[in-house]
Image (spheres, rainbow, N blue to C red):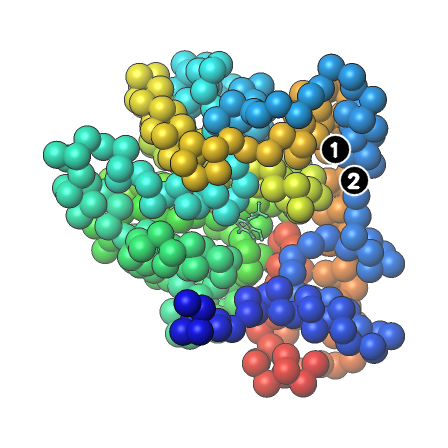
Amino acid sequence: IWAKVEELPPDAIFLTKTLFTKDPSPSKVNLGIGAYRTEEGNPYILKVVQKVEHEIINDKTLDKEYAPICGDPQYVQLCQSVILGKNSLALKEKRVNLEQKKKKEIEGFFCWRFLSYVPFFFPKKNRPQVRNHCLEQVHCVCCANSLNKPTWGNHTKILAKARIEEGSYRYWNAKGRNLDIEGMLEDLNKANTGDVILLHACAHNPTGTDPTPEQWKKIANVMKKKKLIPFFDIAYQGFATGDLDRDAVSHKKTFESAIRLFEKEGFEFVVAQSFAKNMGLYSERAGCVTVVCNDKAYANACQSQLEAVIRPMYSNPPRYGAEIVKRVIGSAENFGLWQQEMTYMSGRIIKMRQLLRQHLEKLGTPGTWNHITDQIGMFSFTGLTGLVVSAL
Ligand code: PMP
């Protein structure tokens, strides 16, 4: 039976990790998987996470029963308050599938897979129209003149597995090493009404380059005019600046958040949120998908559809990671400690950027290096060529 099964090449990023582990060099540096490291190059477990894990172990009221299909409602509510903010009208008016009995809770990967099921939320007679009209294409970011697409590599793979056609819009200006806002707006203008547009809410992976608040407004204007559906991926909230509210969109202090801007502008949208990075819960797979609707009834309907997707897919989510997140966000004291540790992590990342730039400049390395410190979050597009990277 299995003789004809084709062996596929390994995932490039996870392969880098395997090669790194095997490499005997004492001075090796892991620049593969995007995971925060301490000064000593070790993984970092947040102290506040250790604190609540201790509480969890000693909490005799907890059991290992199944979670509800869409996860612990209290957890989901807390996740949504972090992205939408305390003053969110959608939250207040329960337009966010916040019904106590029904919630959804999944990690980034599953959030994405949900997209493929959205057409099936609609009654059968409407479905073909929805297929052609609503989710015909998901636009990821694409480079104007490069073969590689600067978006999280898994986006492309997920869309392919979900059999959703992948479109693209320009994002990265390789020459100026900055955002190609004109190209992006031009491409959004060309998208079809009902297309889904993937937007990285903050600390863009892998370019480290976000739109400014003014540019976000322009993006929102075009998307409104063209009736495009925003799908936010927020995997680095608080990790760029150490401030959750600021990172909900941009590293500019004055701006509240891209997601919050879109909510205020009356958009209906989806958010895929992950706590892998900002709480260091990589292996715990804690995240949440949020559907913001214009009416409470729509939110309940979407919620019921999500339940119908989850039940035959993974049945119900794991509880442990969600329990950690719930205890961190749900307690004022722990929340404060979390903020402090995010400030510490993001501060160290900023310091590393400054040191790298300083050293490159001190060595008289050809070219300009301001982009290293202009970019934010964990990722940096260095501008080095493939050849140089291979040599390194
Ligand atoms: N989106 C982006 C942009 C990411 O970089 C990542 C993690 N690398 C994720 C989503 C998913 O995170 P996870 O599946 O670990 O929650």
Amino acid type for the residue under numbered disc 1: Trp
Q: Is residue 148 visible?
A: no
The location of residue 164, given as percent across then percent down, is 31, 53
5 horizontally vs 325: left or right: left
The residue located at (63%, 30%) in the rendering is: 319
The location of residue 271, given as percent across then percent down, is 45, 37
Contact between labelled residues 1 and 2, with CB atoms less than 8 Å apart: yes
224 horizontally vs 149: left or right: left
| Rendered image: mark on residue 46 | 2
Location of residue 391 (image quadrant)? bottom right
The location of residue 344, given as percent across then percent down, is 79, 43
The residue located at (73%, 15%) in the rendering is: 61
The location of residue 18, given as percent across then percent down, is 69, 69
- Above or below residue 382? Residue 326 is above
Element assignment for label 2: loop
The residue located at (55%, 70%) in the rendering is: 10
The residue located at (70%, 81%) in the rendering is: 392
In front: label 2 or label 1: 2
